[in-house]
Amino acid sequence: MVGFPGSTIFSTFIDSFFHRKEPLRTEQDYLLPYPGFQSAFGLPLNAPERGNLGWINCPEPDPKLPAREGALELRRLITNSIDALHSSNMPNVILICFPTRWAAWRGFKTEDERFDLHDFVKAYCVQRGIATQFLDQDTLTNPQHCRVLWWLSLALYVKSKRTPWLLDAIEEDTAFVGLGYGIDTVAEKGRHVLLGCSHVYSPNGEGLQFRLSKIENPTMRRGNPYMSRDDARRVGDGIRQLFYDAMMTLPRRVVIHKRTFFSKDEREGLIQGLSGVQTVDMVEITIDESLRYVSSKPDGKGGFDEDNYPVRRGTTVVLDDHTALLWCHGVAAALNPRFKYYQGKRRIPAPLTLRRHAGSSPLALLGKEILGLSKMNWNTFDLYTQLPSTIETSNKIAKIGSLLDRIGPKSYDYRLFM
């Protein structure tokens, strides 16, 4: 634990992991009571008490420091605390409690420099193989205490290199890839685009890894980067090698997800780099905010009436041979099967638009896979995310990855970035 001077509230919060907590009445349609960490996950949680080995109070920065100097000083103090804690105690996960009074030092941005303390500490720890979890002081007093305990317990479980759940009913010889880009606006041209690549080695979600690489000759279109054929070939070859190293064989089918369209150079380069893979599906996934549909139900007279709930999660509408709409965000079954659950409980959900740019797999299969992957983000306790984990994680990793000292062929366990 990395606390702060006077962090009694932090130690009180840690104690709540060992006790039962009931959800709020408004959460009971989807949230079970929290039974305590060991009862929930089947193994003990070894959390240090304040003042004992495994707990470090981070020194307090000078309160008079301005934003830039304060952020850089806090960076030094936190990383020094992490190094000391890691070398003396070797914890599975380091919790970093961030007090409200340090908010002004969370980051800064100038014409020549941009700094985010959270992202820097994550990148610093990734290079050292240290799993971390930030906790803002406001989180410690969140009235949704049961939900917070579930979310944080899941994070601790996952970051200690355990797998909480797996995908089911997806082809065993299929692997998934997500491509996401990070753009460093202050880096020199030609080195300002970083590709974050997330790889799911097996269809059940095991073996999720990340590989980061600089894009040497990006093409910018409407503010979005695209790879040259050579860049795409190198990325495809890296993916191919990563899969082979992990499984000692190549999957029969690889599905690549991206939030922008696949250019001709990208399609040809990726397929060339993935030589030996029988089927390569390339799917563009976007959220179409302009489409808002309401659900309907039979009125018993041969017609339909408007339902009081949004479109059901998993609904798919095929538009043509290459395009479909998919509702990842929508109505799902509640804990009580007589009721319905809608995450967020407000607004009409927008569908995802799926566009297949390469491959021949049925759109229904591509949609089913995306729906399953929308439940594979282990960094949230939401029932699902609106985008598949391949897309969400690859974009976040590219953002943090731009801070790593060296970008090379090394792969990282995605838990380190959470």
Image (spheres, helix red, strand yellow):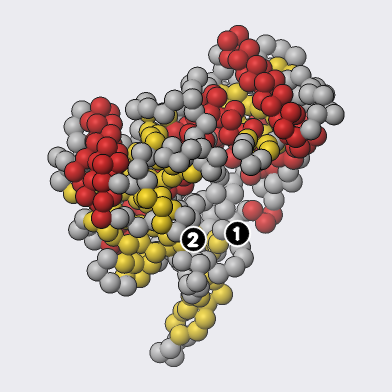
Quadrant hosting residue 147: top right
Q: Position of residue 298 (x, y in %)?
A: 44, 82
Is the Cβ of the residue at disc 1 closer than 8 Å to that at disc 2?
yes
Which amino acid type is shown beneath numbered disc 2? His
**Residue at figure coordinates x 54%, y 24% from the top left:** 125
Closer to the camera, 57 or 215? 215
Reply above or below: 390 against 56: below
Instruction: Indicate left or right for 334 with 282 as reference.
Output: right
Reply above or below: 357 against 289: above
Instruction: Indicate left or right for 377 with 57 as reference.
Output: left
How far is the residue under mark 1 from the one under mark 2?
10 Å
Closer to the camera, 357 or 154? 357
- Residue on which disc 2 sits: 329
**Residue at figure coordinates x 69%, y 54% from the top left:** 25
Label 1: state its secondary structure: loop
Quadrant hosting residue 162: top left
Q: Quadrant of the N terminus?
A: top right
Closer to the camera, 75 or 168? 75
Q: Position of residue 138 (x, y in %)?
A: 74, 40
Label 2: state its secondary structure: loop
State whether residue 352 appears in this view: yes
- Residue on which disc 1 sits: 344
Q: Which mark is residue 318?
A: none
Mark 1 surroundings: few (<14), some (14-19) or many (≥20) residues within 10 A: few
Which amino acid type is shown beneath numbered disc 1? Gly
Q: Position of residue 288 (x, y in %)?
A: 46, 66
1 or 2: tag closer to the N-terminus = 2
**Residue at figure coordinates x 37%, y 27% from the top left:** 408
Q: Position of residue 149 (x, y in %)?
A: 64, 38
